[in-house]
Image (cartoon, rainbow, N blue to C red):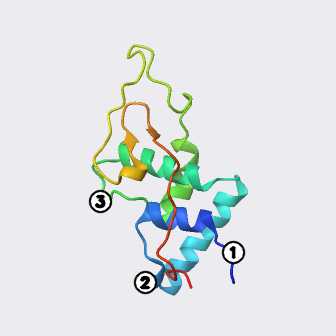
Amino acid sequence: MRTRDLLFEAVLRVSGWEYKTLTTSARFSLNAALKELREVNATPDEVVVRGRRYWDRYANRTPRRPSPSTLAKNWPSLIDTSPLGAPAPEEGPCDHLYEEGDETDRYCVRCKMFTGAVQLTLIEGELA
């Protein structure tokens, strides 16, 4: 049985791509992006956080989700220099303003942080 590649799963999730629908050229692009992300020691959690930063920063772009190559290309610019969870100095402690959505991955738009562990579960057999 193949070991799960959590980075692969995170990039698919952030991009909104489905494994079963990947064409040869899409798979090539995905693998190239994964290679670049591994070179900078990206983690699955970082992929989700920086993917969300891309979403926030480029809210008017279509599509809003970054492709794997877009995520890798913009990786350096998606770093947040303030510690995760730190409110802006003028705001005081963050009282968390959550976006609607999955209860396991609630995202605070003020402190740019997910609550709880980021869930990267797949339907059993999806990658088999």
Residue at horizontal 49 percent and vertical 68 percent from the top:
12
Residue 102 at x, y = what percent? 35, 54
- Tell me the residue that label 3 is attached to: 62
Q: For mark 3, give the secondary structure.
A: loop
Decide which of 120, 70 is in the foreground and name it: 120
Residue at horizontal 51 percent and vertical 66 percent from the top:
121
- Tell me the residue that label 2 is attached to: 21
* Residue 33 seen from this side: no
Picture mark count: 3
Name the kind of residue labelled 1 in the image: Thr
Determine contact: label 2, label 1, CB under 8 Å. no
Decide which of 8, 116 is in the foreground and name it: 116
Q: Estimate how packed mark 1 is, as few (under 14), some (14 to 19) or many (20 or more) residues with alpha carbons within 10 Å.
A: few
Residue 41 at x, y = what percent? 70, 53
Give the CA distance from mark 1 to mark 3: 34 Å
Residue at horizontal 53 percent and vertical 49 percent from the top:
117
Q: Estimate how packed mark 2 is, as few (under 14), some (14 to 19) or many (20 or more) residues with alpha carbons within 10 Å.
A: few
Q: Estimate how packed mark 3 is, as few (under 14), some (14 to 19) or many (20 or more) residues with alpha carbons within 10 Å.
A: few
Quadrant the N terminus occupies: bottom right
